Amino acid sequence: MNEINETLLSAEAIRKTIEVPAHPIKPPITTEEKEALKSRIKKLMREQDAVLVAHYYTDGDIQELAEESGGCVADSLEMARFGTTAKEQTLVVAGVSFMGETSKILNPEKRVLMPDLRATCSLDIGCPADVFGAFCDAHPDHTVVVYANTSAAVKARADWMVTSGIALPIVEHLKAQGEKILWAPDRHLGHYIEKVTGVEMLLWQGSCVVHEEFKSVALERIRRLHPDAAVLVHPESPEHVTDQADVVGSTTKLIEAVATMDQKKFIVATDDGIFWKMKQVAPDKILISAPTAGEGATCESCAHCPWMAMNSLQNIEAMLQNPGPQHEINIDESIRERAMLPIRRMLDFADSHGISGKYQGNA
Ligand code: 13P
Ligand code: SF4
């Protein structure tokens, strides 16, 4: 067996061993309790010169708080950029660990806190830096492009970091330069990029446990029931699902689609945390979750990332009451300095091409 196949098989084996945590149980709270909780958090943030940076997949209450308190709700591209422009000394990142790490890599002088440092991502777990490093070493003639959903150590091996909102133009740019590309870790996103750009890449075999659960046959059935609906798909989904999409794109692109397309109804294949923002920007539209369950369905099939679900208003408050090392992102300085290069390259590219990762319409 050649070296590439061996490495990719080990990536496949790692993927199969990933343990997906159960979703935390979140007891309901009344509107009054929620408002009081948000007020206490805002006060704690003011006292600690902190600002909240939240992803579209977190609970609606968290997204609401981020907006009300002058923070940011965005995709991973804009979350990375926001920290570099925020005046506050502390960034509270509600999302998963790679998002907090990216903030720290770009803002070493700031304190970066996360309510639960165990909130990770199956793509990050499925791409350990040592195995990935060996893969890169075996292909020194390739430009290494990694998805944001990776550890700092993996980014430190990369030439470029991309998010789903900017991957296509960056790969087109590298294609124009005649570069050979090694892509990691998401095999579905990588394959989708190959199809759109016509570029053949060496693909790592990682996947997102949430998006991998969207089912193509069941989607066909739902489309027949709602022929007037547009289908929106995040590109971490399998090929037979993206093939059925009217729009494939980042979380921001999918939100823009709901706000701007003429259709009244949308079938959405991504984490259902995104519905909060979609409903805010297009309250009169009908949103249908793309099917995941079926034979042998598990908790992984509930279209909500179990690691994003580790964020809550309650644990943000608890963290700010006791913001110790158990909440703080720290990265070895030599890794941080090296990992900053591919991220900066992406942000510079985004700036020079006017690419944003935040819904810009009227909220
Ligand atoms: P976006 O950058 O499109 O928000 O995606 C992040 C992510 O983790 C999707 O699963
Ligand atoms: Fe990772 Fe998937 Fe969760 Fe996004 S939804 S953070 S890709 S596990």
Image (cartoon, rainbow, N blue to C red):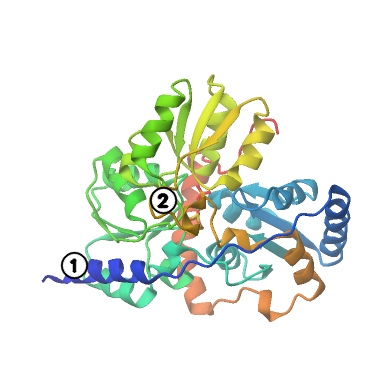
Query: Depth check: 218 or 84 in front?
Result: 218
The relative height of residue 267 versus residue 3 in the rendered view (above or below) is: above
Q: Quadrant of the N terminus?
A: bottom left
| Inter-mark Cα distance, 2 to 1 | 27 Å
**Tag 2's secondary structure?**
helix
At x 30%, y 61%, the residue is: 205
Q: Amino acid at mark 1?
A: Ile
Asked whether, in this view, residue 199 is left or right of residue 189, the answer is left
Rendered-image quadrant of the C terminus? top right
Q: Nearer the viewer, residue 362 or 349?
A: 362
- Quarter-wise, where is residue 137 in the image? bottom left
| Residue designated by label 2 | 213
Which of the 4 image quarters holds residue 288?
Answer: top right
Q: Quadrant of residue 22?
A: bottom right
The CB of the residue at mark 1 lies under 8 Å from ligand 2: no
Name the residue furthest left: 1
Q: Residue at x 37, y 61 (%)?
A: 159
Label for residue 88? none
* Label 2 or label 1, whichever comes before in sequence order: 1
Residue at label 1?
A: 4
SS at mark 1? Answer: helix
Ligand 2 has an atom within 8 Å of the beta carbon of the residue at disc 2:
no
Left or right of 254: which side holds 313? Answer: right
Observer-nearest of 134 and 345: 134
Q: Is residue 311 left or right of residue 197?
A: right
Image position, residue 26 (x, y; %): 70, 60
